[in-house]
Image: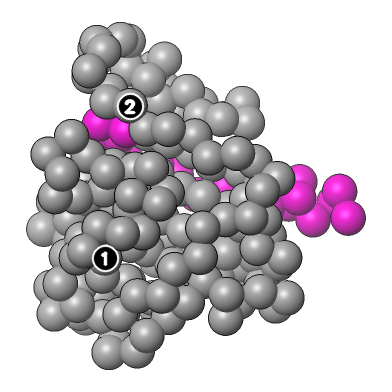
Amino acid sequence: MTTIRRREAIKLLGGAVVAAATVGVVDKAAALELGKPAPDFTLPSASSETISLKQYRGQKIVLVEFFGSASAPTCMSNVKVRGADTQKFADLNVQIIAISSDSPFALKTYADSVKIQFPLLSDQGLQTIRRYEVLAPDNVRALRAFFLIDEQGMLRKQWLLGLAGDDVVFASAPIIAAVQELKTKR
């Protein structure tokens, strides 16, 4: 692990920056190659459905948000931010999917308590978390990260917060701006 300034640790790919003034530790969160196909996944959801990334291909832009745990306050706050902005994303034809290593039961309990309207997926086997290269150093949870995937399944943008994101609530504004930019390039 490397100790660096938190504002440098949270510098996001694509130029968006979330600034925080404290010093923190960031573990390696490898960047996937932009413009390449996003790793596909099929995972159980909090609502007992099985959801695959490929089911949105040709239909929607997908925002995949990895978070550590539904019991961690900052992770819960981050998912709630996306929940509050669900309509903004829907208006842009974006499907939000959040993934953690929690059980479907734990995710359902959380989703029901805060009325989350998008899929929360369980990756207890950590296979998808590993494929997106966001496994935390404790090997039991995901690092905080966001991946924007276009309708053809290509990775277009990513925000890798690593461990520095453990106490930062990441606003939807940079993600929405990236979606708008992606739509104007077509």
Image coordinates of residue 56 in percent, x first then y, are 60, 77
- Whether 70 is drawn above or below 110: the answer is above
Q: Which residues are magenta?
A: 162-186
In the current view of this chain or complex, which residue is farthest to the right?
A: 186
Q: Residue at x 15, y 44 (%)?
A: 139
Q: Amino acid at mark 1?
A: Asp
**In this view of the protein, which residue sits in the foreground, 44 or 23?**
44
Q: Earlier in the sequence, mark 1 or mark 2?
A: 2
Residue 84 in view in this figure = no
How crowded pointer 1 is (Cα within 10 Å; few <14, some 14-19, many 20+) is rated as: many
Q: Amino acid at mark 2?
A: Lys
Q: Residue at x 12, y 39 (%)?
A: 138
Q: Residue at x 73, y 76 (%)?
A: 58
**In this view of the protein, which residue sits in the foreground, 148 or 93?**
148
Between marks 1 and 2, how big is the CA–CA gap? 20 Å
Image coordinates of residue 1 in percent, x first then y, are 22, 18
Q: Quadrant of residue 174?
A: top right
Left or right of residue 134: residue 16? right
The residue wearing badge 2 is 28
Q: Are marks 1 and 2 in contact (CB under 8 Å)?
A: no
In the current view of this chain or complex, which residue is farthest to the bottom?
A: 48
How crowded pointer 2 is (Cα within 10 Å; few <14, some 14-19, many 20+) is rated as: some
**In this view of the protein, which residue sits in the foreground, 104 or 71?**
104
Q: Quadrant of the C terminus?
A: bottom right
Q: Give the main secondary structure of the magenta stretch.
A: helix
Magenta span contains residue 166: yes
**Residue 69: mark in rendering:** none
SS for callout 2: loop
The residue wearing badge 1 is 123
Image coordinates of residue 166 in percent, x first then y, are 23, 36
Q: Residue at x 76, y 50 (%)?
A: 182
